[in-house]
Image (cartoon, rainbow, N blue to C red):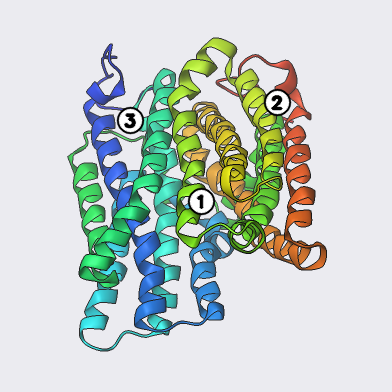
Amino acid sequence: MNLTDTPPVRAPDGLLRHRNFRLLWLGEATSKAGSAVTGVAFPLVAVVTLDATPVTMGVINAMAWLPWLLMGLPAGAWIDRYPRRRTMLSANAVSIAVLVSVPLAAWLGLLSVGQLIVVSFVAGTASMFFSTAYQAFLPAVVDKTDLAEANAKLQGTDQVANLAGPPLGGLITQAAGAVTGLLVDAVTFVVSAVCLLRMRVAEVLPAPAAHRTSTRHEIGEGLRYVGRDRYLRILAISAAVDNFTLNAMYALTVLFLIRTVGAAPGAVGFLLAADFVGGLLGAIIARRVAGRLGTARTLLLFSIGTAPFCLLVPLTQNGPGLALFVLGILVPSIGMVVGNVVVTGFRQSYCPSHLLGRVYTSSRFIQFGIIPVGAVLGGWLGAVLGVRQALWVITVAVILGKLVRLIGPIKSARDFPTAPKEDVS
């Protein structure tokens, strides 16, 4: 059921003619670009301004993921209690405040590594709340039939931002200093907030406080819903396997290119950009392919069919052989983003609105909690086996991990269902 004030008239040229979606998309596109700039500027503040050590950088980076482990499950319950747009606006306000605090402290001569660690954690917490509320808010903006197109456009925007943001961040920091890049990101959060405020969307309000159960019960409800549903369960497990194996590979990628392959440092950024190019292509084709083949078939075809290209990565050599690396990450990235578009749209149309936040964070808790373990394992394998040999082991594991999706009902379905059966066990 559509939850906007008036049912949107489906424009022939797509959702960009839909006022509420256009505002949501514009705000998210601007914010993602700003976050990509910060992805360059923030570590430069630590390294250039504060002369941070590698250990310190590891701690700062870890702080951005720690909120998912500490608060991911209760966050879903809290978000399902309150209007999602209000949560997103609050997260934007917190992000603006902590980002602005860095240049202010730098100008006053008070900036410290401790502050950057706190900022990383608080900004990561705000991002966790925003992204969870955002996923649960989208079905209130567009009809179920438009979720595939909406998620494809949003995924494509993410990839463009990830592709363009780092070079832009480098130019800004070179011209005006790293702390200025954080101010740019703060401004993009303001734009996002303005767009949210201008939207005319009527959400279904959560139950009054008197009728709510405890937070622990609500967390358990979300986990049970994911664990008992045969579609959501296998999708969460398969995504966790992907994150485990892919982050083991990512932990060795830069080291492999520089020390084993002998690529020039300046070329590494361009080589890694192939990942985002593949993601952009995946976002462009996802909706059309899913419409022709079916959503479940598309997920299996693109997830499993593109994975073997990962084997080109350990075959990479310097010179023309670098093309093997580009193909080895570009093609699987197409498959990953096509799968993300399909799965996100399925979850948003399939799950009850009052459970969306908890379903999202329960899945993310499973998927993101494994990331640090995969990264550590990748580094350990590189030290024990050698980097190229470790990549052979890991890329084979990536391919085998994709086969987890063949367990359960997905393999025999053309499309994912749009609503659960009464019995989801």
Q: Secondary structure beneath disc 2?
A: loop
State which tag comes first along the sequence, 3 or 2.
Answer: 3
Query: Residue pushed farthest front?
Result: 319
Could you give the CA–CA distance between mark 1 and mark 3, rounded to whole angstroms?
A: 21 Å
Are the residues at dot 3 and dot 2 in contact (C-beta closer than 8 Å)?
no
The residue located at (67%, 47%) in the rendering is 240
Q: Please say if 399 is above or below 170.
A: above
Q: Position of residue 377 (x, y in %)?
A: 74, 62
Instruction: Specify whether residue 11 is in view.
Output: yes
State which tag comes first along the sequence, 2 or 1.
Answer: 1
- Frontmost residue, 37 versus 176: 176
For residue 48, the mark is none
Instruction: Specify whether residue 369 is in view.
Output: no
For residue 77, the mark is 1
Q: Is residue 166 left or right of residue 359?
A: left
Query: Residue pushed farthest bottom?
Result: 109
Q: Position of residue 129 (x, y in %)?
A: 43, 54
User: Which quadrant of the rendered structure holds the N terminus?
Assistant: top left
Look at label 2 and name its amino acid: Asp
- Which residue is identified by label 3? 141
